[in-house]
Image (tube, helix red, strand yellow):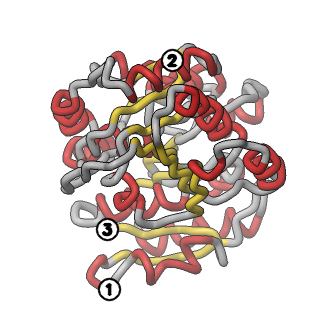
Amino acid sequence: MELDTIKLAKKLFPYRKIVLIIKEEGFIHKNFNKYFSLSDKIDLETIKFKSTLSFNIILKARDIVKKYNIRNVIFFGASELKSLYFSFLELDINLIVRHGTTKSTPKKDWFHKLIYSRINYHVCISKHIQKNIEYIIPFGKYTKSILIYPSIEIPNFKKRKNEKLTLIHTGRISQGKGQTDAIKACSILVENNIDFIFYVVGGFEKDYEKEFLDFYNNLNYKDKIILAGFSNEIEKYLEKSDIFIFPSYGEGFGNSFIEAISSGLDCISYSNTSFLEFREIGLDFGIVKDRNIEILKETLLKISKKEVVFDIEKNKKIINDSFSEDKEIREYLRILK
């Protein structure tokens, strides 16, 4: 969420005055100088945000809005809305809530109906999320939900030719990201004497490391599975890879998947959430029945043997048309006052 906030602020600041109102001692506060320079001309304000209703948050947010004469607020979050509702009472604020994940618990009680009635726009980063938000969250009389895809920059590098088949998975190592399914699928490559290496790029989710390493250490082909750890240089791995295998159990959008497709890799996913949407807009990749490892194996083998070939140039054109930065900026400017 924090990185998404940073990216959007940097995209919009040439067109609007930006004031970042962030959590005191949070990620952005601690790393502000790493991501922003003086030339960005972005002001910074901090609040001790917390999930419960807070009189201090109400007053501080209201003071900041008045100080800068803010007319538009793009909010990344959820629970702090309780306080912001009261902060903005009687103020002419265009309140936009940006949703990057699905919600699980319906918010249909009278209190949430009151809080959410203040929202002007729910911005959803996929149709899957938009459908979920429209079901879970109560809408006010003038509230609208709109779809704005996050932009993806097509990498400018030439893929290397590899001596052996090279696979990659990027993302936080967690149960829901499907790394174990991807690794299990690789057994079919071993059985068919296909030499390969598989880079698993990402740090561990809290409380999952032991379970994952127990699984990993019991593999009879773990020498082919490289746990690369967290990296800020994903492109270096993408440019030397052939297949992006990403059997996630569900994604709000799937940035890493779209980045891999735009990099010219052959990609495989499960048939759930946003991946179905990507197929609907025309992207060409392998899609497998959700959580069916046997079909995942078969698909991986066919792609490895080039029995299935994807239209890489078509994919790049669709990504350039559907996920361009210009389009994302235009969509936001359209709803700002």
Can residue 142 be seen in the rendering of this structure? no
User: Which residue is located at x 16 percent, y 32 percent?
Assistant: 313
Q: Is residue 62 above or below residue 118?
A: below
Residue 38: numbered disc: 1
Query: What's the CA distance linking mark 2 and mark 3?
Result: 52 Å
Query: Which amino acid is tagged 1?
Result: Leu
Closer to the eye: label 1 or 2: 2
Please tell me which residue lies in front, 53 or 127: 127
Question: SS of the residue at dot 2?
Answer: helix
User: Which residue is located at x 76 percent, y 64 percent?
Assistant: 55
- In the rendered structure, which disc, 1 or 2, sits on the residue that comes first in sequence? 1
Q: Is residue 26 above or below residue 297?
A: below
Q: Position of residue 92 (x, y in %)?
A: 45, 51
Image mark count: 3
Question: SS of the residue at dot 1?
Answer: helix
Residue furthest front as drawn = 193
Q: Is residue 219 rendered to the left or right of residue 96? A: right
Please tell me which residue lies in front, 241 or 25: 241
Query: Which amino acid is tagged 3?
Result: Lys
Q: Position of residue 64 (x, y in %)?
A: 53, 71
Query: What's the CA distance linking mark 1 and mark 2?
Result: 53 Å
The residue that label 2 is drawn on is: 298
- In the rendered structure, which disc, 3 or 1, sits on the residue that comes first in sequence? 3
The residue that label 3 is drawn on is: 17
- Residue 72: quarter of image: bottom left
